[in-house]
Image (cartoon, rainbow, N blue to C red):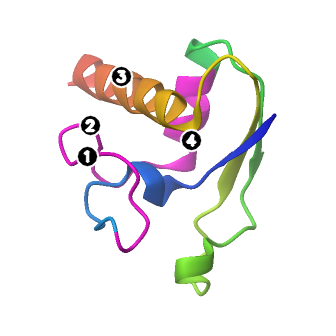
Amino acid sequence: MKTIIWPVYLNSEHTRGEGRKLSLEESVSNPKIREISQALRKLKIQHIVDHSKSYPGSWWEKSGRVVVEQDEKTKIELLRAISTQIRLSRNHDN
């Protein structure tokens, strides 16, 4: 099953109405496509990065997206796992 992940899904700077899928506690501040890709690599999940795409809710902004091909996790479980990995890597970098 293909799952599309837009950075806004994980972004604590956006509201649910603007596209955030996770709670504020679970989300991260301004996640980058590179961070999402690194998190997926650490989780050993195959993915394709598409830098040229724009989230439909903010079509003027080329935020990019990640397309994941997997069947093990639901979309929300996947987003939570990615968010956790990003938080761990950010804490590790500090």
50 drawn magenta: no
Kind of residue at badge 4? Arg
- Marks 1 and 2 close (CB-CB < 8 Å): yes
Q: Which residue was labeled with disc 4?
A: 34
Relative to the observer, which residue lies in front, 34 or 55? 55
- Marks 1 and 3 close (CB-CB < 8 Å): no
| Mark before the other along the chain sequence, 4 or 2 | 2
Which residue occupies 66% across, 73% down? 54
Q: Which residue was labeled with disc 2?
A: 26
Q: How crowded is mark 3: few (under 14 residues within 10 Å), some or many (20 or more)?
A: some
Kind of residue at badge 2? Glu
Instruction: State the separation of the CA atoms marked 3 and 4.
Output: 12 Å
Residue 85: x percent and y percent?
A: 41, 22
| Mark before the other along the chain sequence, 4 or 1 | 1
Residue 71: x percent and y percent?
A: 74, 22
- Marks 2 and 3 close (CB-CB < 8 Å): no
Which residue occupies 54% across, 79% down? 57
From the viewer's perspective, is residue 93 above or below residue 66? above
Q: What stretch is highlighted in magenta?
A: 17-40
